[in-house]
Image (cartoon, rainbow, N blue to C red):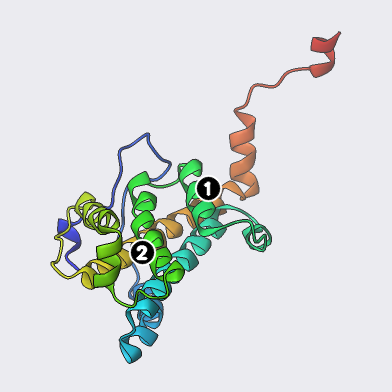
């Protein structure tokens, strides 16, 4: 992918992190690419478009879990709650305002396409899914355009393309969150931050 043509950044002040930095270490990048390729391994073997929709959405949800875990301590315990759906995880991530909202909003067509296949067993192909819900596939193309990336004429390629971009963004921004958390939990840094908060005598105020 030509990163120079893509825009994965956000407007400063709209989220904690707004600048996209490519993975600096080759080992880190290789590990990410290896993990990404495993997500689509089953689809490559079977060419099952239903499998692609489900695996693709699951891969995004998995990376979203990793992302949230970088900021929310013990997120694993929260994630064990069955009521914490994929949709609610996206809303949680948006509410935290950690990264550009457009990245998280781009998950919506991925989730919707998965649901088309999951809830309609007579639908086996992306072509059939598009006939049923054309607006969802238009949303897919629109989300890709938000990143200044070209839209393919093939819906399957667009689906995979958007998944790749979302997972890449979640991965890169997650690395930044890890560094921020390390600094926050450092006792010296924490004392410096807390030390800047005005102190007051609560007993004197109540009296």
Q: Is residue 121 visible?
A: yes
Name the secondary structure under disc 2. helix
Query: Of the residues under marks 2 and 1, which one precedes in the sequence?
Result: 1
Q: Position of residue 74 (x, y in %)?
A: 66, 58
Q: Position of residue 102 (x, y in %)?
A: 33, 47
Alpha carbon distance from label 2 to label 1: 21 Å
Q: Is residue 100 visible?
A: no
Name the secondary structure under disc 1. helix
The residue singled out by tag 2 in the image is 113
Q: Position of residue 112 (x, y in %)?
A: 39, 59
**Front-lying residue, 203 or 95:** 95
Numbered mark located on residue 92 in the image: 1
Q: Residues within 10 Å of mark 2 (few under 14, many from 20)?
A: many
Of labels 2 and 1, the one closer to you: 2
Residue at 30 percent of width and 59 percent of height: 133
Query: Does residue 186 sit above or below 132 in this rendering?
Result: above
Residue at 40 percent of width and 47 percent of height: 99
**In this rendering, position of residue 71 left or right of residue 148:** right
Location of residue 124 by image quarter: bottom left
Location of residue 128 by image quarter: bottom left
Residue at 49 percent of width and 68 percent of height: 62
**In this rendering, position of residue 48 left or right of residue 121:** left
């Amino acid at each position: 992918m030509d990163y120079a043509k893509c825009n994965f950044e956000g407007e400063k002040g709209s989220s904690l992190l707004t600048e996209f930095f490519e993975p600096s270490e080759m080992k880190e990048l290789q590990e990410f690419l290896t993990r990404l390729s495993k997500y689509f391994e089953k689809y490559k073997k079977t060419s099952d478009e239903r499998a692609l929709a489900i695996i693709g959405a699951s891969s995004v949800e998995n990376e979203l879990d990793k992302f949230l875990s970088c900021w929310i301590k013990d997120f694993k315990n929260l994630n064990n709650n069955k009521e914490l759906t994929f949709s609610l995880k996206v809303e949680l991530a948006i509410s935290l305002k950690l990264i550009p909202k457009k990245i998280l909003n781009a998950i919506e067509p991925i989730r919707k396409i998965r649901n088309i296949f999951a809830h309609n067993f007579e639908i086996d192909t992306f072509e059939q899914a598009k006939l049923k819900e054309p607006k969802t596939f238009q949303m897919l193309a629109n989300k890709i355009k938000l990143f200044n990336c070209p839209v393919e004429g093939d819906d399957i390629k667009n689906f995979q393309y958007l998944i790749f971009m979302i997972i890449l963004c979640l991965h890169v921004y997650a690395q930044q969150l890890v560094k921020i958390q390390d600094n926050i939990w450092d006792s010296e840094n924490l004392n410096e931050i807390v030390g800047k908060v005005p102190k007051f005598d609560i007993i004197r105020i109540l009296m």
